């Protein structure tokens, strides 16, 4: 009788997923991709947890048992905006400055036998995931650290775009189109200048997306104010006047990060209220008022703020598919034994839009910001070029409507069952 | 040989349609209803014209030949927001003050053999249509004057609701839900208070619609500020603090018409900028800043402005159907020989929502404003009651998505062919 052969089978370990930074319309679609892929890989991933409120939940050992959610709820994450598990604006300090934070993460990982860490965020988060990979290696703690890209700002390098951006771009393009049609209908006797303020403090991608609303010369928006182009008051005011003369009205999309040549934000224009307080934020009203003072035109302004990044009701189908794909790929990469990488989107062609997912080292992504290149902005600095349109248009392609109940989207609500704590020591957030 | 019998057949006359006041996501659906019904009634309505930019186009004899538009364009009006023919903020003065304006309207009508006048607007416009009916009768000019209801403010009496409101209500309910989910995801480490400013200077219907986002106790929005309820600063601030304590965050929907007991609007709170100019409008930032000063919470605010009333991408199916139905009924009423009336919506049941169109005399509608009744607002003044929800919920029922092309709604663009002028005298707008 021959001895029975024992196949070496790796022990399944647990995984933790966390959302980070400003949420988007599709970050939960990435979560859905992670969870559905993990559920299919039970041989390797025994249990999947999520940090409640992101990395804060991991530090404080406040973990959500994802396995306690129904399959229907998990499917519904694909069309649910915002951060279903909670997200955090919490930047871990440098390794040298606060090694204890990283040590604590490893302690929590060890206590729960976490072998896979999926961190879904932007530049800062890719940096954090990279640092966790480094310290785990130093401490000989075996773990796969995978970053999953997410930003509405579209400012991560080495990826065609960032999941979350396509949907905010679609929302802003549609809103610019609709708002402009409203103004155009009434300009003869009413509002002449309409200003829409959009997000993007350092990168003007979202502002650029407003430009998609105009398809031929003279179409609104007539002026886009990018953070990449220093604002010149006189040239801008002259352009507004020309627009109103030529078209009867003027539609302006302004990035919250629009600033003067000296770096001063328009939104911090030094105005104060009667009590001496700094002017309430909002570059939209600042620009609108500047136009009124110079030309006396009747104006309106809108500030979309959170509505733009939460607007899953008008999500881009391409964006949803990419968000899901990077989540799914993150699990595949981890199972392939990759570490310290991010699944990125590589464009294969623009028309039709074809793309695939490729791995990029976290170190290459961490803390690098991709702004709108000069050749994507027209020579006068106020519009987008054909090259920019060719880049942007596929990203807002297709619709992906959530189901509705009684007139409202039927978004998922998680149970959020807590995982039993294993560590004796509580953790005080710095 | 018997003499041939001549049947008395009324001579077909022409019709004019005009849009008035602030446009909506569905005013063109009413235009579509008028046009499609008129096209089926060629025996009575020979040609259909539209005032370019509303009543201004009629006064200046600047008429659009609706018959020159393709059937496809006309069908597309059903899903096209804003005023496709142009609208105007132009209120005709009283008959006694400016009889010449009314006389001019009749002159234009006579020159183009207009037998039907369809005026699509709100309170003021119903008053104008009523006055035109009166002066036409005085001058023995035969014409059917039919008002077609339209307001996002939902403030017309004698109708269950106003076409245009259902869609803005759906947009605000969806946006409140989505914005609140965003804030809830991040409140632990980021924004605690989110303020959404909505339209409705005198009536709080749109603000009330924000309340639909919350389905159970504690759900956001936590506070609604209605123009119907005088604002009390201390009570409000205490409520905000309680909300943040209880829920970790606070979502506030504020009507642009929110005001103090003395009638002073919050948005005109007397603040000025460094140059002594009155504070840039926007009750949203005023409320947000008030909270920050009192409690120091991190806040965000959004001002939807025109985006809310142009948001056809998230139009209510019920609203679209009603808008089309009042347009169609207007033609039917005219052909039945009715004059000086408005097709109104009568609710037959709430669950399921059933309604029919009934005629209401213009005199009963003109210049009367319907505000939110006290029993629709909770005792504390900050929320909506079950009765209000029962009223509102059907109005946002169903979706009615426009077709898309390259990621954007494929909205109609009219040719807008001008009708040849027949009058020698130009007209100078006052």
Image (spheres, coloured by chain):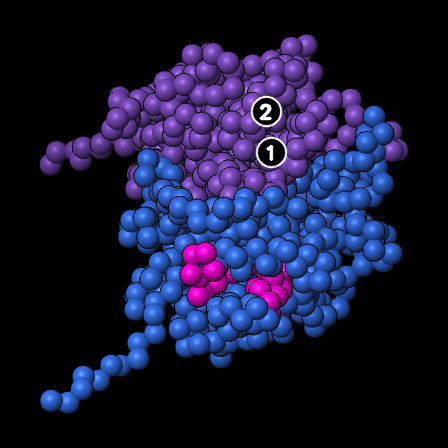
Chain colours: A blue, B purple
Is residue A424 in view?
Answer: yes
**Residue at 57% of width from left, 55% of height from top?**
A104
Q: Chain of mark 2?
A: B
Outermost residue toward the top in this view: B262
* Labelled disc at residue B193: 1
Label 1: which secondary element: strand
Find residue B231 and report its horizontal and vertical position in percent: 62, 16
Q: Chain of mark 1?
A: B
**Residue at 62% of width from left, 55% of height from top?**
A101
Find residue A156 and report its horizontal and vertical position in percent: 61, 66
Depth check, front residue: A256 or B295: B295
Depth check, front residue: A293 or A166: A166
| Magenta residue check for A128 | yes
CA distance for labels 2 and 1: 8 Å
Verify CB contact (< 8 Å) between mark 2 and mark 1. yes
Q: Which residues are magenta?
A: A110-135
Is residue B109 in view?
Answer: no
How many other residues sit within 10 Å of disc 1, few (<14), some (14-19) or many (≥20)? many
**Residue at 61% of width from left, 39% of height from top?**
B191
| Magenta residue check for A123 | yes
Name the residue carrying label 2. B240
Label 2: which secondary element: helix
Q: Are marks 2 and 1 on the same chain?
A: yes
How many other residues sit within 10 Å of disc 2, few (<14), some (14-19) or many (≥20)? many
* Labelled disc at residue A161: none
**Residue at 48% of width from left, 70% of height from top?**
A142
* B195 up-or-down from A37: above or below: above
* B139 up-or-down from A5: above or below: above
| The N terminus of chain A sits in image quarter | bottom left
């Amino acid at each position: 009788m021959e001895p029975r052969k024992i196949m070496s089978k790796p022990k399944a370990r647990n995984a933790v997923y966390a959302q980070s930074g400003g949420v988007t319309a599709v970050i939960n679609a990435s979560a859905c991709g992670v969870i559905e892929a993990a559920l299919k890989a039970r041989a390797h991933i025994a249990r999947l947890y999520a940090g409640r409120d992101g990395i804060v939940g991991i530090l404080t050992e406040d973990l959500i048992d994802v396995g306690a959610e129904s399959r229907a709820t998990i499917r519904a994450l694909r069309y649910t905006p915002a951060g279903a598990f909670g997200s955090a604006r919490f930047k871990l300090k440098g390794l040298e400055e606060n090694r204890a934070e990283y040590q604590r993460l490893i302690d929590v990982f060890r206590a729960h036998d976490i072998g896979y860490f999926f961190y879904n965020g932007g530049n800062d988060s890719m940096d954090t995931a990279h640092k966790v990979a480094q310290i785990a290696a130093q401490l000989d703690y075996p773990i796969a650290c995978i970053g999953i890209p997410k930003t509405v700002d579209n400012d991560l390098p080495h990826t065609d775009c960032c999941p979350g951006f396509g949907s905010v771009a679609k929302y802003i393009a549609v809103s610019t189109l609709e708002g402009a049609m409203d103004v155009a209908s009434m300009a003869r006797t009413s509002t002449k200048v309409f200003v829409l303020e959009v997000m993007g403090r350092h990168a003007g991608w979202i502002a650029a997306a407003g430009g998609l609303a105009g398809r031929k010369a003279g179409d609104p928006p007539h002026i886009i104010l990018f953070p990449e182009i220093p604002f010149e008051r006189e040239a801008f005011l002259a352009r507004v006047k020309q627009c109103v003369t030529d078209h009867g009205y003027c539609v302006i999309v302004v990035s919250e990060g629009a600033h003067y040549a000296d770096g001063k934000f328009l939104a911090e224009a030094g105005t104060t209220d009667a009590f001496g307080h700094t002017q309430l934020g909002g570059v939209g009203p600042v620009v609108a008022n500047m136009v009124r003072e110079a030309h006396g035109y009747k104006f309106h302004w809108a500030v979309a703020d959170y509505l733009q990044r939460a607007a899953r009701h008008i999500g881009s189908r391409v964006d949803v598919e990419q968000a899901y794909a990077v989540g799914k790929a993150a699990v595949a990469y981890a199972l392939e034994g990759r570490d310290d990488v991010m699944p990125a989107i590589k464009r294969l062609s623009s028309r039709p839009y074809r793309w695939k997912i490729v791995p990029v080292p976290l170190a290459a992504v961490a803390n690098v910001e991709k702004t709108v290149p000069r050749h994507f902005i027209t020579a006068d600095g106020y519009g987008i070029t054909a090259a920019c349109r060719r880049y942007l248009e596929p990203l807002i392609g297709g619709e992906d409507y959530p189901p509705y109940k009684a007139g409202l989207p039927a978004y998922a609500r998680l149970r959020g069952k807590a995982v039993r704590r294993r560590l004796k020591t509580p953790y005080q957030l710095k």
